[in-house]
Amino acid sequence: MMKKLFCATYVGIDAQVIDVEATLTKGLPSFNVVGSLSSSMSGDLKERVKSALLTNEFKFPPKRISISLSPSDIPNKTGSHFDLSIALLILLNNSSIALDNWFAFGELGLDGRVKENVYLYPLILSLANQKLLTKVIVPFDALEKLSNIPNVAFYGVKTLKEALELLKNQETIAPNTMNKSIAYPFYEIANEKYYYMKEYKEDFIEVKGQAVAKRAALISVAGFHNILFEGSPGCGKSMIASRMQYILPPMTSAEILDNAKLNVLDDKEPNFAPRRTMRAVHCTSSSASVFGGGSFKAKIGEVGLAHNGIIFFDELPHFSKAVLESMREPMQDNKIRISRVNSKVEYPTNFLFIGAMNPCPCGNLLNANKECRCSDVEIQRYKNRLSDPFLDRIDMYVMMQNVSPADTPTLTSKEMHKKVVESHIFMKQRGQMSFNAKLNDTEIEKYCEMEADAKETLETASYRFALSLRSIKKVQKVARTIADLEQSPRIQKQHILEALSFRKRS
């Protein structure tokens, strides 16, 4: 008799359902696992399952045991979480117990304990998001994290015996689901809750002067617009960039859960706080670390881990040409495709890009108190590292002001975040789903309505500054964000003029 339970494995950053099937037939006793499980995992798995059965007074059947992990065309399946489903199938093979739609995850200890695996959370979250599971057996120790995932009945077990009794009495045993509410401030629009935090570990009040740059940062954050800061060393580029994380727009519960999944994929403890992530990438980083890679499996890179948050490139011209040009795809399409011999994976990359650079190799070109040591050729070569197609993906460009001892602080992060939240509410109340920077052509026509003089100003500027079609749309979207900050239903002329002031001049 053939029995089947369900488990899962990774394909990229998403989970793929795996049918775990078992048959026990007469013949020379053997224990085989087929279905492209990695060779090292197969041996370890069989020893754990055998020991868990024998140390708990179960009999290991003297039969030909065949376990299949299907589909078999997914190569190198890994994970100790297959242990529990395989052991249960061996124990229940000759029973009449129905196993319809049951998922089982858990690593078995040699004494039969069911242990938590760090990758259970992203696997189960991915399956839940795809609406592929409703009831699942998991290690009891994992319930605290897993209870954050809605609409799934979780049955926590501590031992293999408990899991077996659960399936035998499945009609009478209630799930351990403890769906927890997110304990952070929120507001609700159209039946969707948006959560946010009021903690500012780094505050904009610490940035003296730079009123234009802080205004640009506010607009960038409110609409998720890519931004580039250029200025002398020490003028505050990195200070502003690091503080932008704390004033980002609120998050939905789905975004919070996705963020926790990315924490696990980055080998961190999952965090369920409504704080969007920030990834700071070093200029010496390889293409594989930035975009993802690997010989057999395409692992997620920095651009994927920055999804729904910020990715920050400091010293932008010092990045390799290959990395900068490859950034054009995730910046424009909000996704990236990684192709390998054994796999092709697509990751979402809906991030806010922040770049920072000096005006020249020595950094003193704009400094009134220091002399620039660079020749015109060196300066041009330095700037030419950023191609026009790459710069065309940047929504806003800011020339930083010189630092002066007389500069004083202006806005706090709390005040700026309040404006971001208000603009976010204003945007959501008109039924808009995406951030302004991520609007497609149809959505631009619908949501970026302009007054007649604003439209005329944009047309004049497009001819005068030879703006590309992409640049024109970016100006519209930045102007829409400026209008949102002022709670204006339509884009006014002054909004277009301010948006144009943040375009990079050739």
Image (spheres, rainbow, N blue to C red):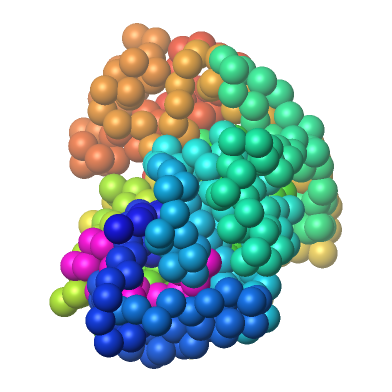
Left or right relative to 89: residue 485:
right
**Number of marks drawn:** 0
Q: Of 361 and 342, which appears nearest the observer?
A: 342
Q: Residue at x 50, y 13 (%)?
A: 430
Q: Quadrant of residue 108?
A: bottom right
Q: Tell which residue pokes out farthest to the left in this image.
A: 341
Q: Is residue 13 above or below residue 101?
A: below
Question: What is the x, y in percent for residue 306?
Answer: 50, 59
Q: Which residue is pictured at 36% across the width and 55% down the height?
A: 4
Q: Residue at x 58, y 74 (%)?
A: 58
Residue drawn at the location 40% of the way across and 81% of the way down: 62
Magenta includes 88?
A: no
Q: Position of residue 98 (x, y in %)?
A: 43, 44
Is the residue 63 above or below the residue 348 in the image? Answer: below
Residue 248 position, x and y percent, is 63, 44
Which residues fall within the magenta stretch? Answer: 65-85
Coordinates of residue 428 in the picture (x, y in percent): 54, 21
Q: Residue 296, relative to residue 337: is it above or below?
A: below
Q: Is residue 78 magenta?
A: yes
